[in-house]
Image (spheres, helix red, strand yellow):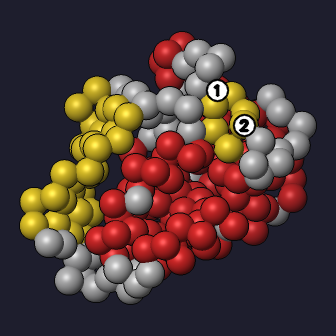
């Protein structure tokens, strides 16, 4: 966490939707006291979905939530996977997400292509690149991304689940502190 915080700048921001989603998931899984603890760890007092907040606040919130939920839900990484899955589910249910889904229809590949735009709409940092290796296989490359790998794996899985993809496979690796590569496929 400290290394990620040291690499963040004041210009690195993220939409409040992800904070709210994480706090609600913590509240649902572990209660109001746990959610309050995580909110305090973030250094913020409240969040508005479409407002931008410092990524440093989301880093602190993410680590606090992973530590709170980890012992009961399969460890830190599994807790972050659950939080990422919920965040993307919440995004796809939001006004922005519904508009995006309307534009892509029921085409899984089109929604996957739009992931680059989702990150652009919701964050001010990093780059994303989608590389197709086949009609239903590819790689998502994230550079300068501050939230741990398991969170993004959960979000990617939620995207594919939402589109009804079958036999989904996702494998992530982290070549450096803020860079990730996710291989994915579905039928």
Along the line of sight, the residue nearer the viewer: 123 or 178: 123
Q: Separation of disc 1 and disc 2 at Cα? A: 12 Å
The residue wearing badge 1 is 56
Question: Around disc 2, counting alpha carbons within 10 Å, would you say few (fewer than 14), some (14 to 19), or many (20 or more)?
Answer: some
Locate residue 151, reporting x and y percent: 47, 51
Which image quarter: residue 90? bottom right
**Mark number displayed over residue 125:** none
Q: Quadrant of the C terminus?
A: bottom left
Side of 168 relative to 147 (left or right):
left
Image vertical order of residue 55 relative to residue 62, above or below: above
At x 35%, y 80%, the residue is 107
Q: Identify the residue shown where x is 10% and y is 60%.
A: 133
The reply to whether residue 137 is in sight is: yes
Please determine whether, in this image, residue 49 is positioned above or below residue 98. Answer: above
The residue sitting at 33% across, 60% down in the picture is 113
List the residue tagged with mark 2.
Answer: 52
Q: Is residue 67 visible?
A: no
The answer to which image quadrant residue 2 occupies is top right
- Mark nearer the viewer, 1 or 2: 2
Q: What element does badge 2 sit on?
A: strand
Who is closer to the viewer here, 8 or 121?
Answer: 121
The correct choice, above or below, for 13 with respect to 128 in the image is above
Q: Is residue 29 left or right of residue 102?
A: right
Q: Position of residue 79 (x, y in %)?
A: 53, 56
Residue drawn 54% across and 62% down?
88
63 sits to left or right of 130: right
Q: Is residue 63 left or right of residue 184?
A: right
């Amino acid at each position: 966490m400290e290394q990620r915080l040291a690499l963040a700048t004041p210009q690195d921001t993220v939409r409040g939707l992800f904070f709210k989603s994480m706090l609600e998931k913590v509240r649902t899984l572990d209660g109001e006291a746990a959610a309050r603890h995580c909110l305090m760890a973030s250094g913020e007092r409240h969040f508005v979905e479409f407002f931008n907040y410092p990524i440093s606040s989301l880093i602190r919130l993410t680590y606090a939530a992973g530590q709170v939920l980890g012992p009961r839900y399969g460890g830190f990484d599994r807790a972050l996977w659950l939080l990422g899955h919920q965040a993307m589910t919440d995004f796809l249910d939001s006004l922005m997400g519904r508009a995006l889904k309307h534009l892509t229809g029921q085409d899984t590949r089109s929604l996957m292509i739009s992931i680059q735009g989702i990150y652009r709409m919701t964050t001010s940092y990093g780059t994303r690149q989608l590389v197709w290796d086949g009609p239903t296989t590819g790689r998502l490359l994230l550079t300068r991304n501050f939230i741990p790998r398991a969170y993004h794996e959960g979000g990617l899985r939620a995207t594919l689940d939402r589109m009804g993809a079958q036999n989904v496979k996702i494998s992530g690796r982290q070549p450096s502190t803020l860079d990730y590569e996710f291989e994915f496929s579905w039928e």
